[in-house]
Each structure stands twice: as C-alpha cells, then as structure tokens.
Amino acid sequence: MAKDFALQFYASGAWKKARSAYRKQAGGMCERCLVQPGEIVHHKKPLTPQNISDPAVALGFDNLELVCRDCHAGAHGRSKRYRIDELGRVIITPTSPHSEPCGGR
C-alpha cells in the first residue's frame, strides 16, 4: 500500500505513463526471480518525501524493476503468501520474512 505522501504521485499521469512504458520495455517476466510474470513496477530506491519530486528517482527507468507479487513482498520485508506442494496444492505460508526469490528452492 502506498504511503500517504505518495498517493498523489501514484495517481498521476506521469507515473502511469512511466509505469506502462517500463512494463513494455521489461518484457513481462519478474526481473528478480525470472520465473513468474512481473506484475508490479517497483522502485529499487524507495520513494521518500524528499526524493519523490526527483524525476530520476520517481520516474527513471534506472530506478525501476518489474517484479512478481512474491518478490515485491520480499523487497518490502513481507512474507511470501503461499507455496505449492509436491501434489500441486496451494499451501498458505505462515508470516515470515521472504528470504529468497519466488523461484528459489
């Protein structure tokens, strides 16, 4: 969830245009695990109230990456939500830090 100071930025046309262009350029797969489709355009250097108006940080492709939901959760120190067991069943995982990319074993 976006922090309050960034809500207006994430609703802006500039962000939507940059996000769309980056998504097309990135090619579709998660740039971290290279296993799952990328869904979220993530800022490598987090946005802060001090740097959100700096286009190089907020909109620059050098600071963006396309990631899957699990790798995005890991980038923010949240847990991986599920795993697939050997029978193909979805197992909800307990809350714990995401320690490896979603494609890792």
Image (cartoon, helix red, strand yellow):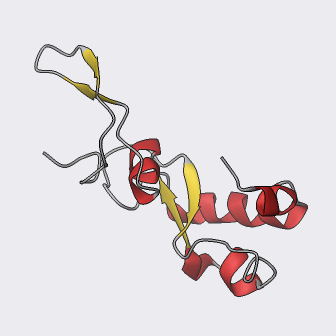
Name which residue lies at 42% across and 47% down: 78
Residue 61 position, x and y percent, is 61, 77
The quadrant of the image that shows the C terminus is top left
Dividing the picture into quadrants, the one containing residue 32 is bottom left
User: Is 28 rendered above or below residue 92?
Assistant: below
* Relative to 78, 54 lies left or right: right
Residue occupying the point 51% across, 59% down: 66
In this picture, is 36 found above or below 21? Answer: above
Residue shown at 20% from the left, 16% from the top: 88
x, y percentage for residue 58?
A: 71, 75
Task: Look at 57% across and 51% down and name the residue there.
Answer: 40
Q: Quadrant of residue 63?
A: bottom right
Residue 29 visible in this rendered orientation of the protein? no
Q: Is residue 56 left or right of residue 101?
A: right
Q: Residue 73: x percent and y percent?
A: 44, 48
Picture coordinates of residue 87, whole percent (x, y)? 13, 13
Give the camera-side residue of 45 and 62. 45
